[in-house]
Image: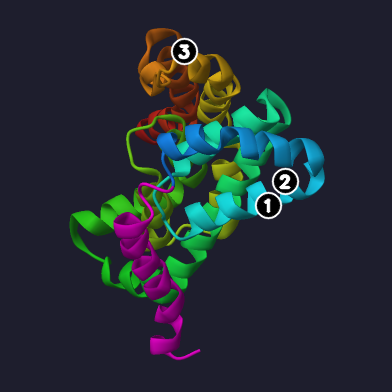
Amino acid sequence: MTRSTRLIPIALILCAAVVGAVFLRERLSFEALAENREALLAYRDAHFLSASLLFVGVYVVIVGLSLPGATIATLTGGFLFGLFPGTLYNVIAASVGAIGIFLAARAGFGATLAERLQGGSASRVQTALRENQWSALFIMRLVPALPFVLANLLPAIVGVRLLPFAVTTFFGIIPGTFVFTSVGAGLGEVFARGERPDLGVIFSAPILLPLLALAALSALPIWLKKRKERR
């Protein structure tokens, strides 16, 4: 593939993200879910398998093209399919979409940027991430500090391998996805009260502290490695 050809996938994703931010924000919103909930439930009850496949496919497109509404899609998975298989559907779809962005970015400009980062502080950061790929990627997924799309692009820019990215993405997003799916599973009562769900629940102490503990556990190999090197 030529250099210009390799840029096509990431260019299409960027264009879709801009178009989606302008034209789809209201269609992929909590209000839209509330308005169409009865039709969605009726379709799920009548065609469960096709509803499951369609949901996963739409979620993959939302994440893969960086469209607005990924959080609403996660809530929808819980609302339609419950905590299980809703969590499984959400994790699979988000992981596949993230891998799509990662591959597009790596093919388009990731390899070139990785080569140009040689030397200086940027190179030290790149080397540190490469040497501690598994721990660093798990921490990035477990702690909701970076927007999801940036957490997909940054590893491609610094030259992370596909296998660590895919595995840490799948398992690293399970805790947070479980929380949001459980919120979605309780949307029936929220709709009945005419309220909105509290999405800030993930930053509450009972949720955030276990996530930070998992992140600390993921960072343990890095600390042990540094300690061994100093010795």
Q: Residue at x 50, y 58 (%)?
A: 64
Is 50 within the magenta? no
Q: Position of residue 15 (x, y in %)?
A: 35, 70
Q: Position of residue 136 (x, y in %)?
A: 43, 40
Q: Given the image, on which type of amino acid does mark 3 rest?
A: Arg
Q: Which residue is mark 1?
A: 54
- The magenta-colored residue range is 1-27
Tell me the quarter of the image containing the C terminus.
top left
SS category of the residue bearing label 1? helix
- Disc 2 is placed on an element classified as helix
Residues at circles 1 and 2 in contact by the CB criterion of under 8 Å? yes
Residue 10 colored in magenta in the image: yes
Mark 3 Cα-neighbour bin, 10 Å: few <14, some 14–19, many ≥20: few
Residue at the image point whose x is 45% and y is 91% from the top:
2
- The CA distance from mark 3 to mark 2 is 26 Å
Give amino acid for label 2.
Ala
Badge 2: few (under 14), some or many (20 or more) residues near its Cα, within 10 Å? Answer: some
The mark found on residue 51 in the picture is: 2
Residue 193 image label: 3
Q: CA distance from mark 1 to mark 2?
A: 5 Å
